[in-house]
Amino acid sequence: MVRAQAETAATQNLFDQTVVSAGGVLNASVRTVFEQTLTDDANQVALADLHLRFGFGSETSHGTVFIPADEPSDFSAQLTDPPGLGQARDSISYTESSRSKTRSA
């Protein structure tokens, strides 16, 4: 969902249609979308606290390293709606990393 929101927002910007530019700058349209919708996403979709960081994955000899985009590129929203009937808050986390694939002939 986050990826789709970010890519859709980036295509709305006629001057820069990348989510994060090669120079490491987060697209202004992407920033605006998450500044405006992240609390709703936390309460209505994720049903959890959300923290998003935008940037690049870079391969090094020690594995993939995350290089954050220039500020502001971090967004957080707390779940403010109470749990529904039969629900409880759990503590979990998930980190997505990108990994480039190398093909050899």
Image (cartoon, rainbow, N blue to C red):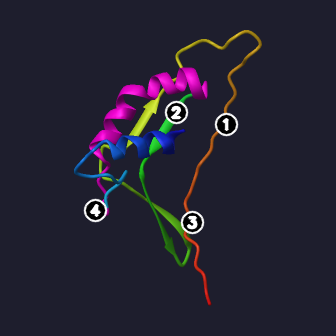
Determine whether 58 is above or below 75 in the image: below
At a point 56% along the width and 13% down the height, the residue shown is 81
Cα separation, mark 4 vs mark 1, equals: 33 Å
The boundaries of the magenta stretch are 22-47
Tell me the mark number nearer the camera, choosing from 1 and 2.
Answer: 2
Cα separation, mark 1 vs mark 2, equals: 11 Å
Amino acid at the residue labelled 3: Arg
Quadrant in the rendering for residue 49: top right
Would you say 10 lies left or right of 78 here?
A: left
Which residue lies under the disc numbered 4?
23
For label 4, the SS is loop
Main SS, magenta region, reads helix
Tell me the mark number nearer the camera, choosing from 2 and 4.
Answer: 4
> How many residues crowd around disc 2 within 10 Å: few (fewer than 14), some, or many (20 or more)?
some
Residue 12 spot, x, y in % from top left: 31, 42
For label 1, the SS is loop
Q: Which mark is residue 99?
A: 3
> How many residues crowd around disc 1 within 10 Å: few (fewer than 14), some, or many (20 or more)?
few
Tell me the mark number nearer the camera, choosing from 4 and 1.
Answer: 4
For label 2, the SS is strand
> How many residues crowd around disc 4 within 10 Å: few (fewer than 14), some, or many (20 or more)?
few
In the rendered image, the quadrant that contains the N terminus is top right
Which residue lies under the disc numbered 2?
50
Which residue lies under the disc numbered 1?
92
